[in-house]
Amino acid sequence: MYLIALCDDEAAELDKTEKLLSDYEKEHPGLDFTVERFKNADNLLCAVREEKYLPDLIFMDIYMPDQGEASVSEVDSVPLGIEAARELRGMKYRGKLIFLTTSKEYALAAFDVDASQYLVKPVAENKLFSVLDRFLRDAEEERKKYILLRIEGRLVRVAINDIVYCEAQGKNQCLYLANGAQHLLRMTMMEIYELLSHYQEFVRIGVAFIVNLGYIGSLNAREIHMDNGKKIYLPRGTYKGLREQYFSYYCREIE
């Protein structure tokens, strides 16, 4: 599933873009677009700022008035969608941004906010479909580096490289990240391991731990010491296999 935000103050433009997205989805069986419409940038910014909504892709009108603005004809008084994009980037939003515009005047400014592209209205089907093709290719590569987890009632993408280890805590599991954050997950250890087992850096330590080999500072026959100071005692008979996995991973890393 991909979350797509449409941000435009003109309902007709929202309808057109949503229709094109629906047409593209129909041509690609199994593809799931979940589209949210925003009539002004304020509502979109608020949703992202409060971490209630994190779209994978945003189509934004380059002229995007505040909620109280009456007309987009008064260009000098209308905040640009680029300004909203700058705020999004300032909030560390790293999704794809596509600007919709009637003019190429702000093309260079679009690059300043790391916009993937801008499309001139009226948007042609082949142009939009080409953008979506590239987005899906990039997203597929990017998603190989992340797992999707439900944390505190919301879906969050967690970077594989940020996971230090996971520890069983009763019926829940606690995920420890490199920045010191801890997240309690209502999942089984097996469910988490199924998500992580595709990556060579993760190994199970007994029934209580999944460890990222890249964050092991040292190990011996009794315990391993993680870079964050955590000491994990090894179950009987696990040291030899873990040592082999650790050195195998380490050697591949330095090649």
Image (cartoon, rainbow, N blue to C red):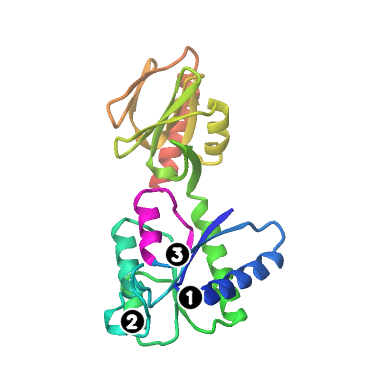
Q: Residues within 10 Å of mark 3 (few under 14, many from 20)?
A: some
Callout 1: few (<14), some (14-19), or many (20+) C-alpha neighbours within 10 Å? some
Secondary element at image label 3: strand
Q: Residues within 10 Å of mark 2 (few under 14, many from 20)?
A: few
Q: Amino acid at mark 1?
A: Glu
CA gap, disc 2 to disc 1?
24 Å
Is 54 part of what is drawn in magenta?
yes
Disc 3 marks which residue? 96
Q: Earlier in the sequence, mark 3 or mark 1?
A: 1
User: Residue 61 at x, y = what percent?
Assistant: 43, 75
For the point 33% across and 67% down, the residue is 84
- Label 2 to label 3, Cα distance in Å? 17 Å
The residue labelled by disc 2 is: 108
Viewer-side label of 2, 1: 1
Residue type at mark 2 is: Leu
Q: Could you tell me residue 139's position as x and y percent?
A: 52, 59
Q: Which residues lie in the magenta part?
A: 41-58
Location of mark 1 (residue): 10
Query: For the residue labelled by badge 2, is the local secondary structure a helix, a strand or a loop?
Result: helix
Q: Position of residue 250 (x, y in %)?
A: 40, 39
- What residue sits 30% from the left and 66% below the top? 86
Q: Secondary structure at mark 1?
A: loop
Query: Which label was assigned to residue 241?
Result: none
